[in-house]
Image (cartoon, rainbow, N blue to C red):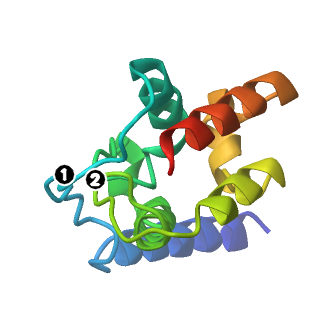
C-alpha cells in the first residue's frame, strides 16, 4: 500500500511538472487603455474598478499563482472572456448597458470561482445596489 502511494505521489508530481510546459495562461500582458466610460464621479470609477476591472479591463493585476498551471489557465480564460464581453478600458460601441446591470443584479457577476478567491467581491445587497448605481450613473 505504501509503495502504491509513493508511485501515485511521484506520478502526480510528474504530471504537475508536465502541465507547466503548456504555454496557455502565461501571457500576462495588459493592452493599452484606449478609452473608458464617462464616469459620473471618481467614486463611481473606484467602485466599478474594485469589483470589475480584474477581468473587465486592461488593468488586470496578475497574482503570483497566475503563473502556475492549472490556475493560470483558469485565470487567463476568465480574463479573456471578461474582456471580450465588457472591457472598461476599451470602451465604445457597447450598447447592452441594461444587460450589464441585469447581470450584476442577478448575481451572475462576479462568477463563483472569483468570489472564492476574492472575498471582497461577495457583495451584500447594499454594496450591490451601490455598484449598480455607479454603473447606471456612468452609462448613457
Mark 2 touching mark 1, by CB under 8 A?
yes
Which label belongs to residue 33? 1
**Please, what secondary structure does the residue beneath circle 2 have?**
loop
Residue 60 vs residue 64, the one in the foreground? 60
Point out the residue furthest to the left here.
32
Which residue is painted at 26% across and 77% down in the image? 23
Judged left or right of residue 17, residue 44 is: right
- Residue 46 in the image: state x and y as whole percent: 44, 25
What residue is shown with label 2? 58
Q: Is residue 21 above or below residue 109?
A: below
Which residue is painted at 42% across and 73% down in the image? 84
Q: Residues within 10 Å of mark 1 (few under 14, many from 20)?
A: some
**Where is the N terminus found, in terms of image quarters?**
bottom right
Which residue is painted at 34% across and 42% down in the image? 64
The answer to which image quadrant residue 2 occupies is: bottom right
Q: Is residue 89 above or below residue 99?
A: above
Amino acid at each position: 500500500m505504501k509503495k502504491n502511494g509513493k508511485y501515485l505521489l511521484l506520478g502526480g508530481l510528474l504530471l504537475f511538472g508536465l502541465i507547466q510546459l503548456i504555454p496557455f495562461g502565461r501571457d500576462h500582458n495588459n493592452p493599452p487603455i484606449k478609452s473608458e466610460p464617462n464616469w459620473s464621479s471618481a467614486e463611481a470609477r473606484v467602485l466599478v474598478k474594485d469589483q470589475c476591472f480584474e477581468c473587465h479591463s486592461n488593468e488586470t493585476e496578475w497574482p503570483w499563482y497566475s503563473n502556475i498551471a492549472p490556475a493560470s489557465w483558469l485565470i487567463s480564460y476568465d480574463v479573456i472572456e471578461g474582456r471580450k464581453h465588457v472591457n472598461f478600458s476599451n470602451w465604445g460601441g457597447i450598447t447592452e448597458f441594461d444587460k450589464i446591470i441585469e447581470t450584476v443584479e442577478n448575481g451572475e457577476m462576479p462568477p463563483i470561482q472569483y468570489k472564492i478567491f476574492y472575498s471582497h467581491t461577495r457583495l451584500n445587497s447594499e454594496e450591490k445596489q451601490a455598484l449598480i448605481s455607479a454603473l447606471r450613473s456612468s452609462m448613457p
